Amino acid sequence: MRTDATAVSNAGQTLGARVRTARRGAGLSQAQLAGEELTKGFISQIESGLVRPSIRSLQYIASKLGRPLDYFIADEPLAATKRVTFHRLAAEAASERSDWRSAEEESTAGLAVATEAAERAGFLRLLASAALNQGRREEAFDRVTEGLALVDVTKQPLDVARLLYVRGLAYGDAGQLVASTEAFETVRDIVERYEILDPRLRARVAVALGTTYRRLGRTTKAIASYEIALATASRANELKLAAQGFMGIAVSHYDAGDLDAAIASYERALELFERIADTSFELHVRQSLASIHFQQGHVAQARELADRTMARATEVGDEHGGAIAQVVRARVLLSDGDAAGAKRMAKQAERALGAVGDQIQRAHALRVVAAACEARGETADADRAFKQAIELFSAIDDRADLSIAASEYSKILRARGSIDEAFAMLELAQTRR
């Protein structure tokens, strides 16, 4: 952070003048400052105001002179505004492609220069999403709370809605389904009350509510929400590729020091993203519908949806989405009496889900493995898989799914005649509801 003295010393100076002043203060010649990275002529042109260096070159110069980058550009109002805009767009684009490290870096940089409350709340939302998707749930809650303190729903309803959406996701990640549902329903109400026309937010709230309704056993509501979400999904993957291309162009412009061009390219990328629902979104909806059909006893529909989802996941190279669909397909195989096939497919899915760190879906895969092993008379393997699933649900504090898994295991233990163990599992299920 710049000191007041630095700000005063910079007042009224051009970028070139600041470089010259800092170079002389460091006792370096133009050639010495240029080093092996730049040239003496380039440094001379900068100091004369004939060229403006790229951010990368300016960072090199700042490092050689022992000065922070802000010493040269932080008190230029237009540059500061452009940087806030650039970091916001870059962070949003990184979030769209699930590059959470980049999203976090850009949001942190943006938060350091943003002054308006709404801007800061936006960066805090992006930081919350990045934290949540990197396994730092409590930090996500803190960021959301901090962001909500900066905005008013009557003045910034979209900002409030987006922050509450992340809070709902965090509650869902913790297995607190009632709190998650309440957060998403509040977002839905804000969207309707203030007539927010953001189609992506509407779609994502619909699919989030579908997921929480399904896990709470509210099947009719779940199906209605998923169908609303699915209606907004697009399969135009060429638009996603084009958007990613614009992001690459934006980074190139930024490295060249052309913030205007970088911002324009990022805005174009995000415009394209808004016209599509990414494939992972589509796969999530389809596999969720397959799960609901299976729960309702519509095995044929569940089989068809699971197969189509698996094929689509293979087509687009989404191993995560494909593995989740495999869990549903394994349940169908088990219901058809193919315990060996169910076990094989569920174990394959469990390994894939473990590799990407999706512990909730991994635990569900283990439940299918356990049920398949039990059907094959492999009780020791069934016990091992059930206990692994229960441990995973406990570790991530997913109370709703833990209760389901414990109840399921209790029934199997009771059928075996292991009454005491069955009663212990039943108690666990009831205390976690």
Image (tube, rainbow, N blue to C red):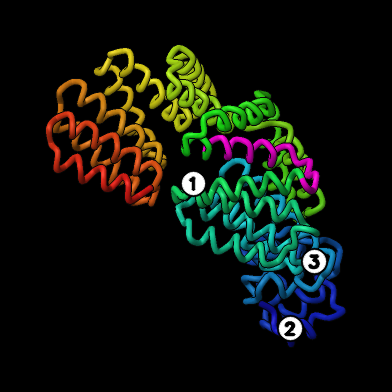
Mark nearer the viewer, 2 or 3: 2
Q: Position of residue 295 (x, y in %)?
A: 43, 24
Residue displayed at 46% across by 37% down: 215
Q: Which residues are magenta?
A: 193-211
Residue under pointer 3: 46
Residue under pointer 2: 6
In what element is the residue under mark 2?
helix
Q: Position of residue 74 (x, y in %)?
A: 75, 71
Query: 418 or 350: which is nearer to us?
Result: 418
In what element is the residue under mark 3?
helix
Dividing the picture into quarters, in which one does residue 352 lie?
A: top left
Mark nearer the viewer, 1 or 3: 1
- For badge 3, the amino acid type reads Ile
> Relative to 123, does residue 297 appear above or below in the rendering?
above
* Mark 2 closeness class: few <14, some 14–19, many ≥20 residues within 10 Å: few
* Mark 1 closeness class: few <14, some 14–19, many ≥20 residues within 10 Å: many
- Does 205 appear in magenta? yes
